[in-house]
């Protein structure tokens, strides 16, 4: 689970600035290991299989399945220590911190899942 802190870099597109990277704060790790509390996540530039970062709102919480860019760097600013989210499947859910539910919108089917159910899947 992460909190979207802020967009970091932007790309000009038809007189609009589109976010390309964002800083996220790790709230809880369900699987795997990440050393830093704050990390950089990259989005789509129009030719990658990633969601556009406008999908994620600054200041809000999400469950994200993150992948290391490692040797898969696609944009010149990406570093091996950065991350991305795949768009090929259900790899993110918006988290409602007050109700303790995650909101899924996979295949245009809206679904609510309790935090407890998500945590049981990974622990």
Image (tube, grey):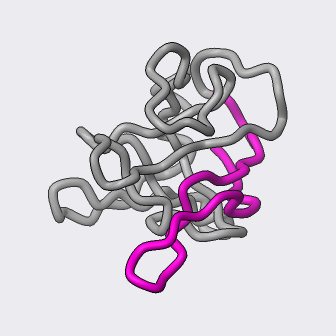
Residue 103 left/right relative to 69: left
| Residue 90 seen in render | no
The quarter of the displayed image where residue 5 is located: bottom right
Image quadrant where one finds the C terminus: top right
Residue 81 at what x, y percent from top left?
68, 23
The magenta stretch spans residue 19: yes
State the count of labels.
0
Residue drawn at the location 74% of the way across and 38% of the way down: 39
Between 114 and 83, which is closer to the camera in this rendering? 83
What segment is highlighted magenta in the picture? 1-29
Considering only vertical position in the picture, is 11 above or below 23? below
Image location of residue 114, percent across then percent down: 49, 52
On screen, 78 above or below 45? above
User: Residue at 52% of width from left, 24% of height from top?
Assistant: 69
Give above or below for 71 relative to 23.
above
Which residue appears at 58% of the width and 70% of the height?
A: 57
Is 23 or 79 nearer to us in this picture? 79
Q: Position of residue 111 (x, y in %)?
A: 30, 60
- Residue at image location 61% in from the left, 16% down from the top: 32
Residue situated in front as seen by the camera: 34 or 123 = 34
């Amino acid at each position: 689970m992460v909190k979207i802190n802020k967009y970091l870099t932007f790309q000009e597109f038809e007189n609009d600035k589109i976010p390309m990277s964002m800083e996220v704060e790790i709230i809880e790790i369900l699987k795997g290991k990440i050393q830093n509390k704050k990390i950089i996540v990259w989005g789509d530039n129009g030719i990658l299989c990633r969601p556009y970062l406008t999908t994620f709102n600054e200041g809000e919480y999400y469950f994200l399945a993150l992948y290391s860019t490692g040797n898969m760097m696609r944009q010149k600013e990406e570093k091996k220590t950065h991350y991305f989210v795949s768009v090929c499947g259900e790899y993110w859910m918006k988290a409602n911190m007050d109700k303790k539910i995650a909101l899924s919108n996979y295949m245009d089917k809206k679904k609510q899942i309790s935090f407890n159910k998500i945590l049981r899947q990974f622990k």
